[in-house]
Image (tube, rainbow, N blue to C red):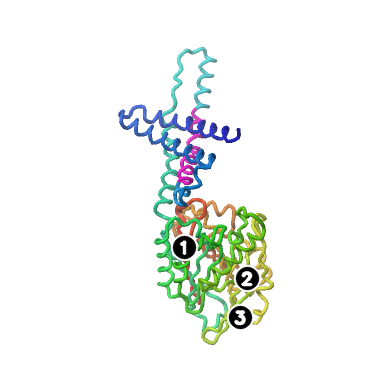
Amino acid sequence: MRFAIFVLVLLAIDWYAFQAVRVLAQHWSGNARTAAYAFFWFLTAYSLFYLFSHYWGLASGWSHNMEIYSRTLVFISYLSKLVVLPLLLIDDIRRLVVLGINQFKGESLYDPSRSAFLSRLGLIIGGIPFFSLSYGAFANPYRYRLFKEKLVIKDLPAGLKGLKIVQISDIHSGSFTFKDPVKNAIKLINEQKPDLVFFTGDLVNDQSTEMDQFMDVFDKIESKYGIFSIFGNHDYGDYHDWKDANAKVANLERLKGVHKRLGWDLLINENRILDINNEKLAILGVENYSAKPQFPKHGKLDEAYKGTEDIKTKLLLSHDPTHWDVQVRPNYPDINVTFSGHTHGFQFGIEIPGFVRWSPSQYVYEQWAGLYQKGEQYLYVNRGLGFLGYPGRVGILPEVTLIELA
């Protein structure tokens, strides 16, 4: 019954949104009008096909890519239609008001037709998410962008000046639809000739097996002094329906093995002290720790910090940027730089350097992308290498970060 009601609601949305198409196309040629109607109702038909296929269990044999892109088409289609509805509602209110006024005046003349202007405006506004999200899914998932920052650290030892660190984050290998384009990210990383590489969590969406076909891609990352990694909230498998608790624990253990086989040094509430050019550098890594109640708090920074008290330069890997304000800055003022990810910049926004920087992410996270500084401490929030849910990006491109210490 609930599924039937849901389908009826979607059909009502379709019928209502179609009114704008009908008004806009009424003076078009027959072929153009037919093409517009056919395109609109094709989206509806495919959406119903997708829903009924899942309801009847027919989608179990679908390929990974068919599932992802079908879900995306349905999402984009109905999001765009929903954007049109407020303009049509305004038009209906306008028509009711005019009808009431005419009835009150006793006038018999009344034009019940919809406003062509409001219908056209609704379709234009609805077209923005449709075409931008479609383009983002087609052109941007693997359009890797290099971000560079030079961090001036107080009393940085001479031997660490010029140290090059590449950060990547939020790979989400279970979301990748193609393998070969990912190799471009590895090429971009290695072209920087990094001294260190940091991975700041969410290697998978849920299951360790998601990395199987990408092992021979990510094991090609090169770094002079090592590759260091941590867990993100998705790595624990909390969003998967496991058959029992033991299966979930076994999955996490397998994921630890994935890091090891990649040649990555996984830091689980611990640290590594490196000797670089006769200078000490402490790299701390914690499990996921978030100030948001919906995300896990496994991180134990006190454990990761032990043994680094006398090290002048400390770099922290912590997946969730909210950790910085809630614990890192107030309790550990000698941690120079914190490297985070998690937000993806919501995979949607506008970034024009020097002019505008906006994303819905900023209404959820104070630090959502790029470099932040408070006092003598820095936080860098990586926009993510992969994607989750929506298989694309609009305005917020997948990121490889190069940070140089100075």
Q: Is residue 365 above or below residue 260?
A: above
Question: Which circle, 3 or 1, is nearer the viewer?
Answer: 1
The answer to whether 345 appears left or right of 21 in the picture is right
Q: Is residue 77 above or below residue 11?
A: below
| Residue under pointer 3 | 312
Q: How many marks?
A: 3
Please state the horizontal and vertical placement of residue 250, each as a whole percent of the image: 62, 63
Going from the N terminus, do you reach mark 3 or mark 1 first? 1
Q: Residue furthest bottom?
A: 278
Residue neighbourhood size for the residue with mark 2, other residues' Cα within 10 Å, grouped as few (<14), some (14–19), many (≥20): many
Magenta span contains residue 280: no
Residue 285, disc = none
Please state the horizontal and vertical placement of residue 242, each as a whole percent of the image: 62, 55
Residue neighbourhood size for the residue with mark 1, other residues' Cα within 10 Å, grouped as few (<14), some (14–19), many (≥20): few
Q: Report the magenta stretch's main SS.
A: helix
**Mark 3 residue type:** Lys
**Mark 2 residue type:** Ile
- Give the residue at x 48% y 30%: 16
Q: Is residue 214 above or below residue 46?
A: below
- Residue span colored magenta: 70-91
**Mark 1 residue type:** Gln
- Give how far apart the Cα atoms at labels 3 and 1 are: 40 Å
